[in-house]
Amino acid sequence: MRMTLSQIAELVEGELTGNGELEIHGATILRDVQEGEITLADDEKQAERLTASPASAVIVPPDFTPEGIAYITVPHVHRAFTAIATHFQPPRTQARTGISPAAHINPSATIGANVDIHPSASVGEDVVLGDGCTIHSGACLMAGTVLGPEVTIFPNAVLYEDTQVGARSVIHAGASIGAYGFGYDTVEGAHQRGAQLGRVEIGDDVEIGANTTIDRGTYGPTTIGDGTKIDNLVMIGHNCRLGKHNILCSQVGMAGSCETGDYVVMGGQAGIKDHLKIGNFAKVAATSSLMTDVPDNATYVGTPAMAERELWPIIASQKKLPEMRKMLKRLSRKVDELAAQASSAQASSAQPDRSEAA
């Protein structure tokens, strides 16, 4: 499959600079691009790598003018490149399969129109599936689970009792939604599990990554707000309440009863102490250990995490520590020398004047 650069520019509604008759047979990222392919460069910092690459053409933003290569200027580089890559390598489409006779469906379940339930999926008692849902093989929807329209549950995900999932949400393979929270009381020397009477409520347009776990609430729900995107291998404890359009990167761990505002971003491996409140548009940097509340619009960094504006002066000071250590040693030696001189002078003044004595 080939396209000329003029055809590609027309496809993405971009402005072409260069030979419009040049034929392109593929699209890939700068690291892997070969001759005859088009790539993308979304920042001028990539100019050197672009010049060294065998790419035949490139998609760039308006503020980047590459040299020595044909280019198409667009306002949204990644959106345009997605359209081009999709043309050269269309995503695999899956035909609707309907309800497999090899699926396990409780007779009390309510199944909407145009629902696909693949072999070996399990749909429990009183489950409700909205129109257009897709339940892949091995997925388990336990009693009382309710899915809105066009929800997709990938293989081997488990939704515990009474889980609720909003419209168009996606839950990836191996995710566990609604497991018991990690709360115990020690009674007569033994750990006894606390109440597990809540559930998990997931909003509309939420995406939950593979092998992510979200615990049910103790009495009420653990909630995930509309539009929130959760990466693979994330842990969300019981009673947490996440706002709308949060972004949680891989291996984030949130202890129980935390609350977030809207548009919160947490970097990979960030750890969040229990009962914290994180404000709207706040950010927690990767690998940070958060021990305090975070106000709106703030960025917290480090272990223990602190406001970014407070951390950088500390880091700058730490970089000076080797030189400060050398200076301290020099000052210490000087103090010792001065002390020795003072002691010697004091001893001399204490000696009697022998000429006067004679």
Image (cartoon, grey):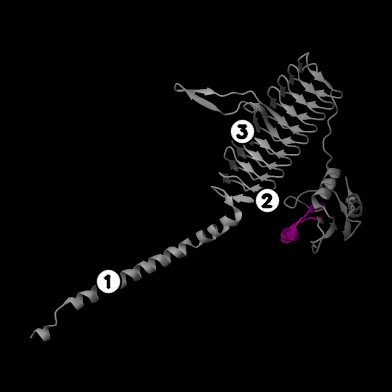
* Three-letter residue code for mark 2: Asn
Residue 138 in sight here: no
Please, what secondary structure does the residue beneath circle 1 have?
A: helix
> Which percent across, then down, holds residue 65?
80, 63
Q: Quadrant of residue 50?
A: bottom right
Distance from disc 2 to disc 1, alpha carbons, whole Å, reads: 57 Å
Estimate the x, y position of residue 324 in percent, counting from the top left: 45, 64
Vertically, is 120 above or below 92?
above
Q: Indicate left or right for 274 with 163 as reference.
A: left
| Residue assigned mark 3 | 237
Q: Which residues are magenta?
A: 37-58
In contact (CB < 8 Å): disc 2 and disc 1: no
Numbered badge on residue 340: 1
Residue at (86% x, 44% y) in the render = 87
Q: Is residue 13 magenta?
A: no
Instruction: Residue 187: give x, y in percent of width and height.
Output: 47, 22
Mark 2 highlights which residue? 297
Q: Nearer the viewer, mark 2 or mark 1?
A: 2
The structure residue drawn at horizontal position 35% and vertical position 71%, both measured from the top left corner, is: 334
Q: Quadrant of the C terminus?
A: bottom left
